[in-house]
Amino acid sequence: MRKTITVIGAGVAGLASAIRLQNEGFQVTILEKESTPGGKMNRIDLEGYAFDLGPTIVMMPELYREVFEITGRNPDDYIPMVRLDPMYSGYFDNGTKEYQVTNDLVKNMEMFEEISNEDAEGFLRYLTDLYQRFNVAKNHFLQRPFRNKKDFYNPFMIGQGMKLKTLNNAENLMKKYIKNKRMRQMISFQTLYIGISPFKGPSLYTIIPMIEFLYGIWFIKGGMRTMASGMERLFLEIGGEITYDTNVEQIVIEDKKATGVMVNGSFLASDYVMCNADFPYAMKNLVKEPEHKGKYQDKKIDKMDYSCSCFVLYLGMDRKYPELDNVHNFVFSEDLDTNINQIFEGDVIENPSLYMYIASKIDPSLAPEDKDGIYILMPVSDTNTLKYEWTEETSNMYRDKIMSKISQLPGMENFEEEIVVETTMTPAEFEGRFNAYNGATFGLRPTLTQSNHMRPQSKATHCDNLYFTGSSTHPGAGVPIVLLSSKIAVGELLKDENHQ
C-alpha cells in the first residue's frame, strides 16, 4: 500500500511539492483553505477584467518548466510562454524621463554609454562579478538543504561562502560598479522583489537584475494564474487529490512524529505532512506543543525580521494605453532613499515608488475588447513595523498618492477618470487571506542572519515526518526560489523515506 502525504496549502511550493511526491509514488492530498489553487499566485476576476493577484514577473523559466518535465509532460501544453523585450520601463522626473531596459547587451551598453563610458565599463564588471557569484550560489547554496550545522560549517562550504561576498549591502555594491544614481537605483531597487531594502539586503541579491539582464523575463499566456492552474491540472492527472475550502487547524504530532492534521475537529491521518503554510504562521498556530517547535518558539517568531508588505490596486480601465510601451513599468520616487527608509521604518510614505503591470497589453483576453486592466503595486511596511494604523483612510490616502503619480506619466493625465472598476489588496488582507505573518507579502526577510543555514529549513528539527516549504524557508522568496524550496523539501522527505 502506498504511503500517504498531506500537503497543507496549494500555494506555488505546495503544488510543486505535491506533483513531485505524487510522481515518486506516494498518494498525496492537498488541503487548501481557499477555493482555488495558487495561494498568492491567484487571480482576481472583476467585470470582465482578469488580474494576477500577486507575482507577475517570470524569471528563470526553466524552473517553471521543470515541474512539468519531471512527469514526462511538455510544459508548453500547460504554461505557454513568450519572452518580453524590452523587459520594462523605468520612469524618473515625475514620469518625464523614461529608460527602457532590455536584455539585449548592445542596447543596454548604449544606454549606459549615454551616461558615461565609466558606467558602461562598470555595468560589464557588475555582470561578470555577479555571474560568478550566481554560479556559486546556484551550485552550492540555493539547491541544497542545511540539515545539520556541519552541512554549512565545513572548510569547503565556508570557502564557497567567502566567494559570495555577502557582507556588503546591495546599494553599496552597486556604487562600486555604477556611479549614476538612477542607473544604480534601477538595479538595486529590485531587492524589493523579495521584500528587503537594498540598503540592508545582502549584496548577493543584486543577482536578481543580473539574471534578468542575462536571461530575460517571460510572460505566461493568461497570466501567472496559468502556472497555478497548470500545476493543479497536472497534479490531478497523475492521481493526486485536492480538497478546497478546508482550513487545517493543527499538525498532529505523536511520539515526536507527525501523524496527520486536524480539520474541523476531525483527525486526518497520513504518513508524512508537507506544510506550505507560511512558516512563522505554521510554527505559531499549527504546531501546538512547545517541545516540537525547537528554537522557533512564539517569542522568537515575533522577534524575527519580516519583509515589506504591499498595497495593490487592480484597475479596470475604459481604454487601451498605447502611450505606455511595456507590460512592466517602474515609477521611481524623486527621493528613493527616503521612500525605502520609510517603508522599512514604518513611517507614512510621502512620495512612493510604484510598479505598474499591464498584462492585457500582451494578452488582450485579460480585459474586455479595447480595454486594459492595470495592476499597481506600492511597497509598504508590514503590519508589525507600521507606526500608524492601517484603516480605510490609509488606503484612500495612498490611492490618492498613486493617482497623482500615475497621472504624470505620458498620456495618463485623465487616468483616474478612466477607471471603470477597481479593487485592492492591503497588508491586512495578505495576512488574513494567506496567513502571511504580519502581512509580510514575501515572508521572512532574507537578512544575513535569516539566510542559508540560518533560515528555517525544510525538515522539522524536533519531530519526524514533518517538512516545510515556501517563501519563509530556505532558500527564500520569489517564485523561482520558492520552486527550489519545494525541490529541496521533497528531497529531504525522500532521503528520510529511503533511509527508513
Image (cartoon, rainbow, N blue to C red):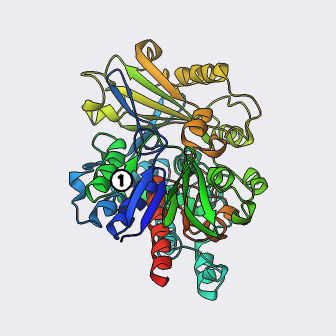
Viewer-side residue, 125 vs 41:
41
Residue in the picture at 51% in, 62% down:
273
> What is the quadrant of residue 487 in the picture?
bottom left
The three-letter amino acid code for the residue at tag 1 is Glu
Residue in the picture at 68% in, 67% down:
167
Specify the farthest residue to the bottom.
Answer: 155
Visible residue check, residue 103: no
Viewer-side residue, 180 vs 461:
461
> What is the quadrant of residue 164 in the picture?
bottom right
Specify the farthest residue to the top.
Answer: 417
User: Which residue was labeled with disc 1?
Assistant: 241
Residue 498: x %, y % from top left: 45, 81
- In this view, 226 is above or below 456: above
Residue 260: x %, y % from top left: 53, 60
- Give the left or right position of residue 84, taking residue 430 as reference: left
Specify the farthest residue to the front.
Answer: 266
Quadrant (top left/top right/bottom left/bottom right) for the N terminus? bottom left
Viewer-side residue, 477 vs 272:
272
Residue 9: x %, y % from top left: 48, 50
Residue in the picture at 60% in, 59% down:
252
Residue 298: x %, y % from top left: 75, 54
Secondary structure under tag 1 reads strand
> What is the quadrant of residue 153 in the picture?
bottom right
- Give the left or right position of residue 57, taking residue 263 as reference: left
